[in-house]
């Protein structure tokens, strides 16, 4: 009786061997994609941290000239804000980005206005009444709190990766070990991170939280 055997042609592969190669390549592709995704996310977060460092330099210049960090609410001379949304971020912009500000022109390519508000008239040092905010890598406002306003809960509008609006309530951050606020005599900046939601694990702060 003759038996039939699957034979490999000269220099060829069997079907099983080809399938095994395809499976291995698929696994490697998934692993590479996951690694590259992590690399991109890390790079995006690092870009926002670098931006915050640049803003901190402007804040230090402002504090040196004015004797205090910028307010995170409107002063009596500025009048009443059009709304309370994104308020701290807008106050930060007004303080450091005017024509005499410590960061004049420096963050123009980072400005966003997710709540689409304006002041009734232009402020001195500004050509348009748009109440801009300095935005993170994902185009969302970086929340800002002066230490006098750490008890405040601020509404912020962000946009997620699917271009959907998110309404947030943002609070200054506390050290979970001590229960004290970070930067107790200074100011806090907080980015909502890649997911566009404040209060989640991917938030990015202007200070070390671990």
Image (tube, rainbow, N blue to C red):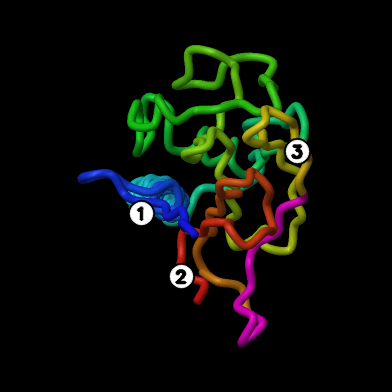
**Is 103 on the left-hand or right-hand side of 74?**
left
The range drawn in magenta is 169-179
Image vertical order of residue 6 relative to residue 181, above or below: above
Q: Circle 2 sits on which residue?
A: 208
For label 1, the SS is helix
For disc 3, the marked residue is: 166
Q: In the image, what residue occupies the spot 66% across and 36% down?
A: 160
Identify the secondary structure beneath mark 2.
loop
Task: Return the residue at label 1.
Answer: 60
Q: Left or right? Give the position of 15 relative to 146.
A: left
The location of residue 169, given as percent across then percent down, is: 77, 50
Give x and y (percent) for residue 64.
34, 54
Locate residue 163, reporting x and y percent. 67, 27
User: Is any atom of residue 15 visible in this view?
Assistant: yes
Q: Nearer the viewer, mark 3 or mark 1?
A: 3
Q: Residues within 10 Å of mark 1 (few under 14, many from 20)?
A: some
Tag 2–tag 3 contact (CB < 8 Å):
no
The numbered mark, 2 or 3, whose residue comes first in the sequence reads 3
* Residue 142 on image: x %, y %: 55, 44
Above or below for 78 versus 14: above
- Label 2 vs label 1, nearer the camera: 2
């Amino acid at each position: 009786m003759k038996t039939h055997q699957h034979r490999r042609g000269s220099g060829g592969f069997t079907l099983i061997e080809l399938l095994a190669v395809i499976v291995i390549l698929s696994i490697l592709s998934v692993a590479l994609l996951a690694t590259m995704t992590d690399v991109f996310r890390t790079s995006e977060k690092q870009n926002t941290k670098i931006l915050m460092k640049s803003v901190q330099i402007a804040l230090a210049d402002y504090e040196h000239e004015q004797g205090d960090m910028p307010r995170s609410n409107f002063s009596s001379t500025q009048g009443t804000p059009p709304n309370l949304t994104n308020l701290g971020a807008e106050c930060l912009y007004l303080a450091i980005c005017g024509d005499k500000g410590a960061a004049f022109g420096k963050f123009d390519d980072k400005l966003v206005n997710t709540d689409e508000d304006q002041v009734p008239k232009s402020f001195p040092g500004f050509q348009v009444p748009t109440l801009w905010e300095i935005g993170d890598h994902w185009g969302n406002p970086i929340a800002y709190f002066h230490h006098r306003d750490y008890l405040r809960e601020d509404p912020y509008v962000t946009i997620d990766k699917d271009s959907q609006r998110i309404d947030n309530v943002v609070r200054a951050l506390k050290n979970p070990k001590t229960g004290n606020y970070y930067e107790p005599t200074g100011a806090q900046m907080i980015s909502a991170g890649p997911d566009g939601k404040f209060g989640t694990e991917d938030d990015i702060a202007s200070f070390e939280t671990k």
